[in-house]
Amino acid sequence: MANKVFSTEAFRRPAVTAMQIAGQDGQVEDKWRHAPLMGRLNRIYYFSVGMQIAGGTSEIQRNVIANRGLGLPR
Amino acid sequence: MDLGLSQEQQMIQTSARDFLEKECPKSLVREMEEDAKGYSPELWKKMADLGWLGLVFPEKYGGSGFSFLDLAVLLEEQGRALVPGPFFSSVVLAGLPILEFGTEAQKKEHLGKIAAGNEIVVYAQTEPSATWEASGVELKAELKGAAYVLNGTKLFIPSASVADYLLVVARSKAGTGKDGITLLLVDAKSKGISYTPLKTIASDHQSEITFKDVSVPAAHVLGTPNEGWKVVEKIALWGAAGKCAEMVGGAQKVLDMTVEYAKQRVQFGRPIGSFQAIQHHCANMVTDVDGSRYIAYEAIWRVSEGLEAAKEVSMAKAWVSDAYRRVCALGHQVHGGIGFTKEHDMQLYFRRAKAAELAFGDGDYHRELVAQHLGV
C-alpha cells in the first residue's frame, strides 16, 4: 500500500514537472509535429492522474496504511 | 471593504450563466473539439446578438461601452462553461488593441464587424521558439515601397484557421530585442499564408501559420512601426488577466462538481464527503478557488482602471495557473475512477487548465517577472 502511494505520487511529480519544462510544446498531442518525445510526454501527463486513482486511490491506500499498517483506530 | 460585483456585473454573470447552460451544453463543447471550425456559428451569432462581442467597445463602434472588469465577469462564465471558439482571440487579444492603438480608420473598419460577429481577428505572437519574450519574434516584415513583405512562422495560434484577419507580431528591424517590432493586421486569406492544424491538449484548434512573401499594405500597421513591443506588452496584460478570469470560472465549476459528488457518492455506508480526507481536499480546493478569484480580480481591476498592473497581473497568472491545476488534481482524487473517464466532464477541465496555464506564460515565467519587479 505504501508502495502504491509512493510510486504513483512519485510518478505524478516528474510528469507535471516534465510538462512544465516542455512549455508550449508539451500541449501537442501524440504523433503531431512539435510534440516532444513523439507525444509520449502528453500521454504520461494524462496517465499520471489515473495512476493515483486506479486500483484504489491514494486516500484509500493511506487509510489502509493508517488502520492496518500502523494499527490506528478507525 | 466590499469586494463583491456591482449590480450590473451580477446581471452579466447571471444572464451569461443561464444563457450558456442552455446554449453551450457539454455536448456542444465535445462536438466542437472534433469540429473542423471549432466553434458554432449559431452560438457565435447569438453571442453577437446579446452584445457580448462588442461589450467593451464604445457605442460609436457598435459596442456597449462596458469596462474590462465587466468583460472579465463574462470571461469567467465562459471559462465555467468552456465556451469553444475565437471569443478570446477576437475580442480580448485583437479588439482591445485595435481600440487602444488603432487609427480611426482601423477602428471603423474592424470594431463594428467584430462586435456584429461578422469578422474574426486572431492574434498571432508565438513562434517555434515558444517564448513570450521579444527574442521570440523572428518573423520578418520588410518594408518595400508601400507594403511590408512577411516571411516566417507563427506557432500555437488558437482558432487561426477561422480568422478573417490576423494580428501579427513581426520583426521589422534586425535584432532580437524590444526595438524593431511591428504589429500588422493581415488579411488571413492573403497569398502566401498557409495553415497547418495542430492537435493539442485542450482541443482548441491551434495552428502553425507559415508566411511566404506575404504582402501587407503599410496602412495596416497597428500602432507605430518598430515600436510595437509596447502594444505586445499591453496585449500580454489583457491576455494574462483575461485568462485568469477564465481559469477562475473553470476552477469554480470543478469545485462545484466535486462538492456535489462528495455529498452524493456513498461508500462504506455513508457519503464520501463525511470522510475527513475528502473534506480536507474540498477545503483546499475552495481556498484555492477563492484565493484565485481575489488575486485575479485585483489584477483585472487595475488593468481596467488603467493603473500600473504588470506586477499584479504576473502574481495572478502565476498563482491562478498553478491553483487551477491543483484544483483539478484534487477534484480528480475525490471523483475517483468515474472522473477519469472520457464521458465525465472533469477531463475537459483538466485539459483546458493546462492550455490556460501555458497561455501568456506559465507560473515559472510570471514568478520570474514578479521577482524582477521586486528588484531581485
Image (spheres, rainbow, N blue to C red):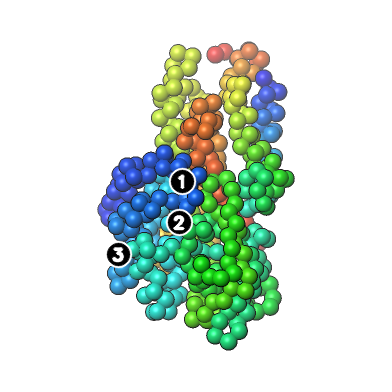
Spatial CA span between label 3 and label 1: 29 Å
Q: Is residue B278 left or right of residue B22?
A: right
Residue B149: which quarter of the image? Answer: bottom right
**Residue B304 vertical placement versus B42 (above, below):** below
**Residue B92 vertical placement versus B34 (above, below):** below
Name the residue carrying label 3: B64
Closest to the camera, between mark 3 and mark 2, is 2
- Mark number, residue B252: none
Q: Looking at the picture, which amino acid does disc 1 mark? A: Met
Provide residue B340's location: percent of width, then percent of height.
54, 31
Residue B87: which quarter of the image? Answer: bottom left
Residues B214 and A56: in front is B214
Q: Is residue B116 left or right of residue B283?
A: left
Q: Looking at the picture, which amino acid does disc 2 mark? A: Pro
Provide residue B244's location: percent of width, then percent of height.
48, 52
Write the residue at 65% across / 39% down: A43
Observer able to see residue B26 = yes
At label 3, counting other C-alpha atoms closer than 10 Å, the crowd grade (few under 14, some 14-19, many 20 or more) is some
Provide residue B349's location: percent of width, then percent of height.
50, 41
Provide residue B6's location: percent of width, then percent of height.
30, 54
Q: Secondary structure at mark 2?
A: loop
At label 1, counting other C-alpha atoms closer than 10 Å, the crowd grade (few under 14, some 14-19, many 20 or more) is many
Write the residue at 48% across / 32% down: B344
Closest to the camera, between mark 1 and mark 2, is 1
- Mark number, residue B86: 2
Q: Earlier in the sequence, mark 3 or mark 2?
A: 3
Name the residue carrying label 1: B32
Q: Earlier in the sequence, mark 1 or mark 2?
A: 1
Q: Chain of mark 3?
A: B
At label 2, counting other C-alpha atoms closer than 10 Å, the crowd grade (few under 14, some 14-19, many 20 or more) is many
